[in-house]
Every structure is written in C-alpha cells, then in structure tokens.
Image (cartoon, rainbow, N blue to C red):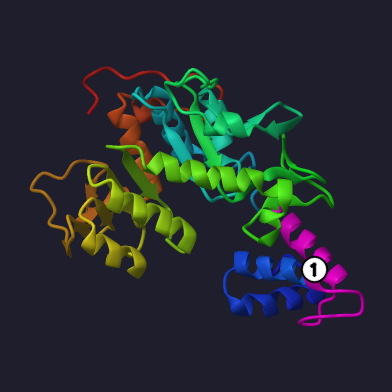
Amino acid sequence: MLAALDADDARALKKQLEIGSLEQALSRIRRIAALLSAGQSVDDLSSAQATSLDARVCAEIVKALEIKATTDLTSVEYMAAWAGASQYRLPVEIFTVNYDLLFETALERRRVPYFDGFVGTLRARFHTELVEGSSGRDEEAVPAFFVRLWKLHGSVNWLWETQHIVRLGQPVSGSLAAAIYPSDAKYDESRRIPFVVLQDRLRRALQEPETLVIISGYSFGDDHLNETIFEAAARRPRSEFLAFCHSKIPDVLANRASDTPNLQAATGTEAILGGVRAKWKAPATPQPGVWENDEFLLRDFRKLAEYLARNAAIDPKNLVTGPAVLPIASPKVP
C-alpha cells in the first residue's frame, strides 16, 4: 500500500501504521474523519484529509486484490468442489475475514450454488431473516444444498450507501468506498446490520452440537473472533475444532488449546492434540499429499483443500481450471 500511494498519502498512512496492522490504521483514520470538526487536525490529518486517505487506500487494496487471468485458483477450486460434493445433515458454512472474491469465483466456476446473505444481482440487498434462518425450520428459505459463504469483514464488492450496504456484481471502482475492514463505521445504525448479523451467525454455527470446525489461514489476530471460537470449543466438548497453522502456532491459540482438548492445532513440525503439545512423528508409510520430508502438509491451505477434495471422491488430477463441471473420480481414488 505504501508503494502504491503518492508520497503525501504514503507518509500519512505510514504514521498510522505505527499503531499496528493495516486494519487498525484504517479504523483510526475513520475515527479521525468522524470526530474532528472544521479547523481541527490529528496526526496532521483533518477530517476531509482522513476521509480522502481512507478512500485512496481502499481503492488501492481493491486493485491489489483483483483476480487476473493469471491468478491460480486451483486451491480454492478444490475447496469449492469439496463443498459442492459434501452431503451433511447441515449445510457447509464458509466464514472468511478476507475481502477478495476468490471463493465466489471458485464456487461459480465449479457451478456450486451458494448464498452470501444478499439477494439480487445488480445491487443486491442484505436479507437478515435468511441469514438468521435455521435448517429444518419452516421459515428456512435457502435450500440446504446451498453452500453458505459469510464475509465477516466485508468484501471488495460491497458498497456503502446512505442507508445500507449493497453487494455489486463486481468490485467497487472509482471514488466509491468499498465496505471493507472492521471499524467504528460498521456500527453506524443500519450500516452495521450485515456485520453484526454475520458475527452472530458465526457464533450460532459454532454452537451447533457435534460440529467439525476446520480453521485454515487464520492468524488468530482478531480478539473478538478468537473469543467466539474459544468459547464455542469450551461449551461444546463433543465438537472438534482443528486449526491448521502455516508457520507456527500463535501463543493465544496454544494457551487455549492446552486447556481445551477438543481445540487442536497443527503445523508442519508440531501439534497440540488433546491438550498435549509435541513434535510430529512421521508414519512409517507416509500418505502422499499429507506427509512429505517428515512434515505435515495440511498446514498449507493448498494441500488441505486438495485433501478434502480427494476425500469427497473427487480426483484433483481431473480438476481443470475453467467452466467445465468437475468430474467425479472412481471409488478407487483414496
């Protein structure tokens, strides 16, 4: 972001980044824009300057997350294929804090029907009653075979409007502000509805008895989400929470996993299973795609997605990027 902005904007953003992550910096910029009166400034930013900086940073992020013809969608297509082939009592629910359109693109390329809380095509409106509906109830209007895709921190194709947020058919462009990132603005009257409702959907989904929760690519850097996950693991001891960590197990996760047997964490070289932390001991006959060079491969989202596709009787070798329907493998595929 710093490289993409002009010198003045980059200098202003860099100062805000001293407090923490990009999301924290943007939250502070939005507070400056909302709280200052004419003639006031904080960190050399007036309200108007902060608003302008926010819009330019968001525009650059939307541009950086653009899906190009060269983008490798293999791993998310594996995940989409698994989600589409899975048949469980309750629908598959995918929760993500990412803003990109990778999952939407992969689900559509695999022709997997999904629901994201919005109804419509050009300027889709959020429907709280459909998000809050529970499978098996008469008022449930979304079929169970629809995959649920919940964007907890917004999306590059969500647009702020005066009274609400709408989802567009493409990323927000120009000077328009995409509804992304956690900030105070998310809790302004009607604008807060998608985020509050989706957070509650996550809480209720995790409270379903005997649920399997797979966590991949999440760094446990959001305290609110962490507590939602940890509380559910503690309250539902017969559910299983599996966190795959790409590099190392975050301390906040390690501390809770040590006290919560059904909250398990795994990296390439070690794991916390049943509250016990230890190094992996590779099996005598390592399974391809799971073990390699004495490392557990499912820590990597790409390997995890491929593994799930195989276990849904889908042969990843037949997964060809494009509009074709994914073929089903023979029963001999492991």
Residue 142 position within the rendered picture, expressed as x and y whole percent measured from the top left: 53, 22
Q: At numbered mark 1, what does the secondary structure look like: helix, strand or loop?
A: helix
| Most foreground residue, 189 or 41 | 189
Q: Amino acid at mark 1?
A: Ala
**Is residue 82 toward the left or the right of residue 14 in the image?**
left
Residue 169 makes an appearance in the image: no
**Quarter of the figure that contains the C terminus:** top left
The magenta-colored residue range is: 35-63
Q: Is residue 39 magenta?
A: yes
Quadrant of the rendered structure where residue 18 is? bottom right
Decide: few, some or many residues near mark 1? Use Cα within 10 Å; few <14, some 14-19, many ≥20: many
The residue that mark 1 highlights is: 33
Image point 72% across, 50% down: which residue? 189
Image point 33% across, 26% down: which residue? 315
Relative to 82, say whether 276 is above or below: below
Image point 75% across, 76% down: which residue? 12
**Quarter of the figure that contains the N terminus:** bottom right
Residue 319 position within the rendered picture, expressed as x and y whole percent measured from the top left: 43, 28
Quadrant of the rendered structure where residue 60 is? bottom right
Residue 216 position within the rendered picture, expressed as x and y whole percent measured from the top left: 39, 50
Q: Is residue 227 magenta?
A: no
**Is residue 60 toward the left or the right of residue 93 in the image?**
right
Relative to 328, say whether 63 is above or below: below
Magenta-highlighted stretch: main secondary structure? Answer: helix
Residue 162 position within the rendered picture, expressed as x and y whole percent measured from the top left: 82, 46
Quadrant of the rendered structure where residue 193 is? top right
| Most foreground residue, 24 or 15 | 24
**Is residue 163 toward the left or the right of residue 296 in the image?**
right
Q: Kindly give the residue lying farthest to the left in the view shown.
A: 284
